[in-house]
Image (tube, rainbow, N blue to C red):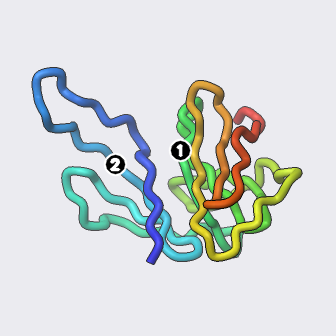
Amino acid sequence: MKLCTVPIAPSVLAATSVAASAAPVVGLVGDKTLVMFDTDNPPVSETMDVSGVDRIVGIDLRPSNNTLVGVTPDSTMVTIGMETGAATEVAKMDKPLTTGDAPVVVDFNPMADRLRYMTGTTNHPFIPIPAR
């Protein structure tokens, strides 16, 4: 079972404490199931299937607008509504990433506001997507 997780709210560290504050987190399990839980209470509190796509290979939170973004196997970037699970196409990469059986990393660079999309052998370091 593959589980990719991203925080859906910033986690705050207390300056005088070694413990982190609780933060809600969303993860991707299987082909398109989102699981939600809290870092203080790790058991899954909610699940939701992503609609409008057959499969999602990775997810990450876009820090600039707090939007959950996913990537499909055909290199389409989608936003995912956290209330409904509905996927909406945002852009399609001009150079598809061959995924095969390799794990996929979907990660936003918050400084550049660009998506990094990688496997163990291929790296699309910065992919601009339209502001939403």
Q: Position of residue 77 (x, y in %)?
A: 73, 53
Q: Nearer the viewer, residue 105 or 69?
A: 105
Q: Circle 1 — which element?
A: strand
Q: Mark 1 = which residue?
A: 61
Q: Which of the labelled discs sits on residue 24, or is there none? A: 2
- Relative to 14, say whether 122 is above or below: below
The earlier-in-sequence mark between 1 and 2 is 2
User: Residue flagged by tag 2: what amino acid is it?
Assistant: Pro
Q: Nearer the viewer, residue 30 or 82?
A: 30
Question: Which residue is rendered at x = 62% and y = 65% of the image?
Answer: 57
User: On the rendered structure, is 64 left or right of 126?
Assistant: left
Q: Nearer the viewer, residue 128 or 66?
A: 128
Q: Name the residue furthest front.
A: 121
Question: Which residue is rendered at x = 56% and y = 30% of the image?
Answer: 110
Question: Which residue is rendered at x = 62% and y = 50% of the image?
Answer: 69
- Relative to 10, say whether 116 is above or below: below
Disc 1 residue crowd, few under 14, some 14–19, many 20+, Cα 10 Å: many
* Figure quadrant of the C terminus: top right
User: On the rendered structure, is 43 left or right of 79?
Assistant: left
* Figure quadrant of the N terminus: bottom left
Q: Circle 2 — which element?
A: strand
Q: Position of residue 17 (x, y in %)?
A: 11, 29
User: Residue flagged by tag 1: what amino acid is it?
Assistant: Leu
Q: Position of residue 13 (x, y in %)?
A: 24, 30
Question: Which residue is rendered at x = 67% and y = 35% of the image?
Answer: 114
Distance from the alpha carbon under mark 1 to that under mark 2:
12 Å
Disc 2 residue crowd, few under 14, some 14–19, many 20+, Cα 10 Å: some
